[in-house]
Image (cartoon, helix red, strand yellow):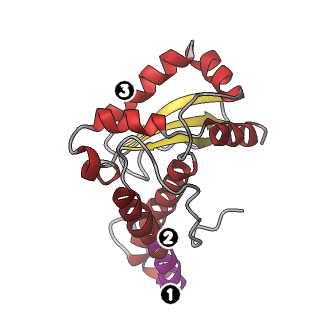
Amino acid sequence: MKNYGEIKNLSFKELKGGISQKTIEIHWEKLYQGYVKKWQEIQENLETADREMANASFSEFRELKIEETFTANAIILHEAYFDILGGDGNPEGEIIEVIAKNFGSFENWLKEFKSLGLASRGWAVLGYDFNEERLRNYIADAHNLYGIWGAAPILVLDVYEHAYFIDFGSDRKSYIESFFSNLDWGKINQKFQKTAKK
């Protein structure tokens, strides 16, 4: 069971291909853990927020509920991003076959997903859509924008500048290549199998 207020452990020690330890420390220890702490703060403030003053223009309750979705999704997406890193990047497992089935070929999916990473302002997500019972590529410009109800993230790429700018400058394309060289497809496959069988 997921607890948004609990900081997960990082599942790898370091990455190769240009993603530095400094970037990981800033991204994991400051940004991700900051979202967890902010979610905890929002929960405390919700206990005392005045529901009688709630309205759609502005109210403390409304603002807290909006930011609750932002921080919860930030936690989910960051954990999904970090959970699949630390591997050798070699595609393997049942998910490769399912990707090929859903996208025509693994190569078609890879080309589309990398393009998604270049087109997004925040996130590229391979998600399992429970409504259609298949994999789909989705884009999210912010944590709580464009999410699909009934879809679970399987493979998540963070393309906010904090994920790559220290190491790659504005060369997002090289960062995306490095991301793929660090994927742990065994973990991705496990996540897919667990999700698709729900």
Tell me if 185 is positioned left or right of 37 in this view. Answer: right
Q: Is residue 129 above or below residue 5?
A: above
Q: Which element is circle 1 on? A: helix
- Who comes first in sequence, dot 3 or dot 2? 2
Q: Is residue 30 above or below residue 43?
A: above
Write down the residue under mark 1: 48
| Quadrant position of the N terminus in the picture | bottom right
**Residue type beneath disc 1:** Thr
**Residue type beneath disc 3:** Ser
The Cα atoms of the two marked residues, 2 and 1, are separated by 20 Å
Q: Is residue 83 above or below residue 27?
A: above
- Who comes first in sequence, dot 2 or dot 1? 2
Residue 37 spot, x, y in % from top left: 47, 75
Residue 29 spot, x, y in % from top left: 43, 68
* Tally of numbered tags: 3
Residue 70: mark: none
- Who comes first in sequence, dot 1 or dot 3? 1
The Cα atoms of the two marked residues, 3 and 2, are separated by 30 Å
Write down the residue under mark 2: 36
Q: Is residue 92 above or below residue 79?
A: above
- Neighbourhood count class around disc 2 (C-alpha, 10 Å): few under 14, some 14–19, many 20 upward: many
Which residue corresponds to the image point at 30% horizontal and 32% vertical from the top-left? 173
> Which stretch did the figure color magenta?
38-50
Residue 75 spot, x, y in % from top left: 51, 60
Q: Which element is circle 2 on? A: helix
Write down the residue under mark 3: 115
